[in-house]
Amino acid sequence: MDQGSVRRALINPRITGRSVYRGTDLGAGDWPAILDADTFAQVEERLNDPRRRTAFNTSARHLLSGIARCGVCDGPMYGSPMKSRERRWMVYRCHDRHVMRRMDLVDEVVEGVIVARLARPDALALLSPDVDLDALRERARDLRERRDNLAALLAEGLLSAASVREQAGKISTELREVEGRIDGATGDNPALTVASSADAAAAWEALALESRRAVVKALVSVTVERAGKGARFSPEQVRIEWKV
């Protein structure tokens, strides 16, 4: 296998054990995952970085890598370097490059919205509701099973590719919301640390990147919309939906 073949294999999402059809995630495949999602995100970022070195850290290096979704295909977006003669910068983009937006601007919008919400007086009550974990876990299992069945229905010709894409998108959106609620109700919750602080912005800045990512995943879904050709960035291009 030549270098190009190895590279293509490493940036194919199937390596994470996911079944993907024309850019649509249809759920877990019937093969074992070689890389977990965070490691895959890091590998893709490094392989697209001309300055990469052989060794790398397996933790995600950017706030929204693998979390933000493309407004066109609903696929995950990852950090990718860009450059011109004068400068270099980072963008978030999906695998098929439907949407590319400057990373620092997208991060600024998402962080600003989250910190503003966690600074409100009712934030602690919002983050500490009574949660039926058994019901949430059962719902997550049901959604995963429904999503996994779509690939079989497509293969048997019982559903069209367009119908599968539509249903897979709806199921994946709800599953992310349910999983976020489960994550928020179990284990350490860095969102509570920020919400209980007298200075939410300072508390947010003090969090490690991994903790910030956990807060984002637990509280919101982030979709980056396509802008018109030549359009400047605006916060409206970042759609944020609350899970709580």
Image (cartoon, grey):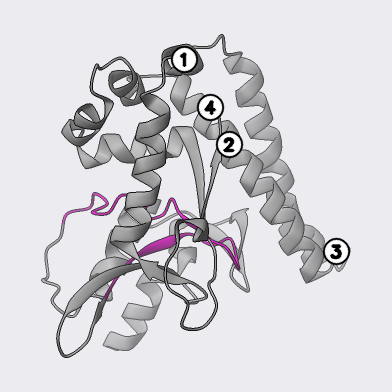
Residue ID for mark 2 = 177
Position above or below: 217 against 54: above
Q: Residues within 10 Å of mark 1 (few under 14, many from 20)?
A: few
Is there a contact, CB below 8 Å, between mark 2 and mark 4? yes
Tag 1 secondary structure: loop
Question: Is 161 positioned to the left or the right of 133 in the image?
Answer: right
Where disc 4 sits, the SS reads helix
Q: Earlier in the sequence, mark 4 or mark 1?
A: 1
Residue range of the region highlighted in magenta in the rendering: 57-81
Q: What residue do we see at 39% from left, 46% from top?
A: 110
Q: Tell me the CA gap for discs 3 and 4.
A: 31 Å
Depth order, front residue of 56/1:
56
Q: Residue at x 50, y 17 (%)?
A: 126
Q: Describe the element under mark 3 as helix, strand or loop.
A: loop
Q: CA distance from mark 2 to mark 4?
A: 6 Å
Contact flag, marks 1 and 3 (Cβ < 8 Å): no
Residue position for label 3: 159
Q: CA distance from mark 1 to mark 3?
A: 45 Å
Q: Are marks 2 and 3 in contact (CB under 8 Å)?
A: no
Of labels 2 and 3, earlier in sequence is 3
**Circle 4 residue:** 181
| Numbered label attached to residue 122 | 1
The image shows residue 178 at horizontal and vertical percentages of 59, 32
Image coordinates for residue 51, horizontal then vertical, percent: 13, 77
